[in-house]
Amino acid sequence: MIKIEQDKLGLQDYFYIGYLYLIILGIVSDAIFYGIFGVSYLNYTTILDALISPISLLTNNWKISLFLGFMFWLMYLYFTKWIFKLYAYLREKKWYQKVYNIEKWDKKYETLAKKKNIIPGMMFIFFLLFISMRTGMGIGMRYKYANKEIIPNHTLIFKDNMRLDVRKIGQNSAYFFYFIPGEKVITATPITDNLKQIKLLENKK
C-alpha cells in the first residue's frame, strides 16, 4: 500500500499527484456515465479530456458543485470530529460493549485521532462522492429518456449544411454525444471532421 507522507512532498509532487488524480477521476467517472448508455467511452477520449472533465463538470453546473461541496464538508466533519463523539457515546452502552471489543476499538480510535495527514482519505472520499454522483446522473438520465419524449436542446449544423436537432448528452474535445429524437441509442459524432456549428436551442429543457 502506498503511503503519502505529507511533510516530504514538494510543490511539484502535489501537482503530479493532483494531475494523476484528476485523470483517474475523469476516466473512471466518464467511463461509468457513458457505459450506462452502452458507449465504450475509452474509445472516444484522450488524457486531456479526462483531465478537464471533472473541472468542466463542476464549473459549468453550480448545483452539482454546491451538492458535492456540502457532502464533502459533511464527510470531513464526520471523519474528523463526529465519528469520535459517536464512538464515545456508543462505547458506554452495554449492548455495544457486548458486541464489540472495547479495548481493541479504543486503541484503533486513539491511533486514528493521532493521524494528522487526512489528505489521502479525503481524496478517496471525494472520489467516491464524484463517482456516485456521475453514476446517479447516468442512471437517472437513461431512465428519463427511456420513458419520456426526447426533446432537442441543440442544433447540429454539418459541413454539408445539413441541420439536425438533437438532445446533447455530453461532449469532449473530439466528439459530440447526443440522442436523436425517436432513437434510444447515443450517437457520437466527430466534431472537427463533421460539424461546422453547434447551436443551443432556447427554452428547451
Image (tube, rainbow, N blue to C red):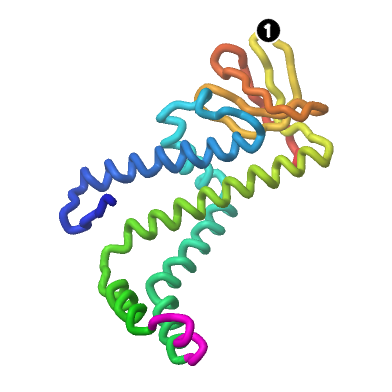
Start and end of the magenta stretch?
93-101
Total marks placed: 1
What is the magenta segment's predominant secondary structure?
helix
Q: Is residue 105 above or below residue 150?
A: below
Q: Nearer the viewer, residue 25 or 87?
A: 87
Q: Is residue 103 above or below residue 140?
A: below
> Where does label 1 land, which residue?
160
Q: Residue at x 43, y 76 (%)?
A: 83
Q: Is residue 18 left or right of residue 32?
A: left
Please tell me whether mark 1 sits on a helix, a strand or a loop.
loop
Q: Position of residue 174 (x, y in %)?
A: 52, 22
Lateral position of residue 1 relative to residue 66, left or right: left
Horizontal and vertical percent position of residue 40 = 57, 28
Neighbourhood count class around disc 1 (C-alpha, 10 Å): few under 14, some 14–19, many 20 upward? few
In the image, what residue occupies the spot 56% across and 39% down?
32
Quadrant, the C terminus: top right
Which residue sits furthest top? 160
Residue type at numbered disc 1? Asp
Q: Is residue 96 shown in magenta?
A: yes
Residue displayed at 74% across by 20% down? 164
Q: Position of residue 128 (x, y in %)?
A: 48, 53
Foreground residue among 71 and 43: 43
Furthest residue toward left: 8
Place of residue 137 in the rendered image (x, y in percent of width and height, measured from the top left): 63, 46
Residue at point 59% right, 54% down? 63
Of 36 and 51, the residue lying toward us: 36
Q: Is residue 54 magenta?
A: no
